[in-house]
Image (spheres, rainbow, N blue to C red):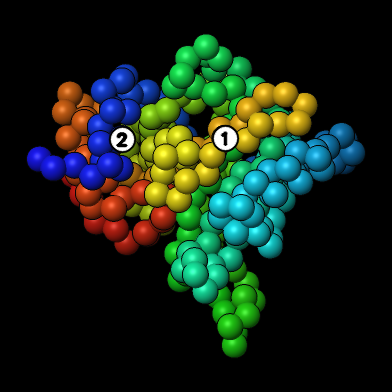
Amino acid sequence: MNLTPRSESLARWYEAELHVLFTRLSNPADRPLPTEEEIDDFEPVDADLDAVIRDHLELHLGAPNGTSHDTRGPVPIDVALTEPADRRPWGACCTVGASARAMPTADADSRDSSRYVELFLRLPKSAFRYWESVVLEPFDDLFEAVIDALGELGRLPHEQRVGYRTPQIVATPDMSPLVAGLPFAGVLLRDASTGTVPVPELAMPGGGTVTFLTVTFLHPSEIRALSGPDRVRAATRLAKRGVDELLAPEREPVL
């Protein structure tokens, strides 16, 4: 089998141990309204961190021109939004604030883990609503749920005291939809520095390095294949079919 450079890279990743975390994400509809005390104690994403990450994103994903603000805490995590452009027929959303704290159990000495991460995925142009070429209301309920899920994935290591180690799968225990309305049971997290749209690591002014992870939605059969003994071949097939962090809600299973 002749492999492209990208699929060769995937194959090398999957020669190492694949990490799988089974969990469920918080549903916004189930969240109680914050109390007055919680509102008073809430601290937004650090302004300096926000600015540094947005400047970095602008170089690689386009200038963020919208924000979904977190109102939960105790680790505030916003999601920055980038609209499609003439030469970039897709938008993107990226967590801002997940890297404010180190992941609790990440192994800083392992080349497959990073102590500080932000997550991103790309959105199709169809996710945006337009009127005379101007975005009026970027997302419908389905894509709003995707953005919320991205924020929850950024918050998960801090709430559950786990660390992401790429390649990392996060999936529901019973392979039910991770996000209501989508057929995908989980996501694959990978180092974005060698992805379809590369986003390199970011050296922070105060020390430390932020690694950006792509978020690729997966069908149950794909999760099983990537978790099985023939995961290198499965990863190569996904790469050859162009399955990556660009969300395609109606995508059929590849494996």
Q: Residues within 10 Å of mark 2 (few under 14, many from 20)?
A: some
Q: Tell me which residue sits at (68%, 43%) in the image.
A: 53
Which is nearer the eye, 82 or 45? 82
Which is nearer the eye, 139 or 112? 112
Q: Are marks 1 and 2 in contact (CB under 8 Å)?
A: no
Which dot marks residue 9?
2
Q: Earlier in the sequence, mark 1 or mark 2?
A: 2
Whether residue 28 is visible: no
Residue at disc 2, secondary structure: helix
Q: Tell me which residue sits at (42%, 40%) in the image.
A: 194
Residue on which the image places disc 1: 201
Whether residue 85 is visible: yes
In the image, residue 51 sits, relative to residue 172, either above or below, namely: below
Name the quadrant containing residue 130: bottom right
Is 5 on the left or on the right of 80, as rendered? left
Residue 136 at x, y = what percent? 64, 76
Q: Tell me which residue sits at (41%, 44%) in the image.
A: 195
Name the quadrant containing residue 33: top right
Residue type at mark 1 is: Glu
Name the quadrant containing residue 42: top right
Residue at disc 1, secondary structure: loop
Residue type at mark 2 is: Ser
Residue 116 at x, y = what percent? 61, 27
Q: Tell me which residue sits at (75%, 38%) in the image.
A: 49
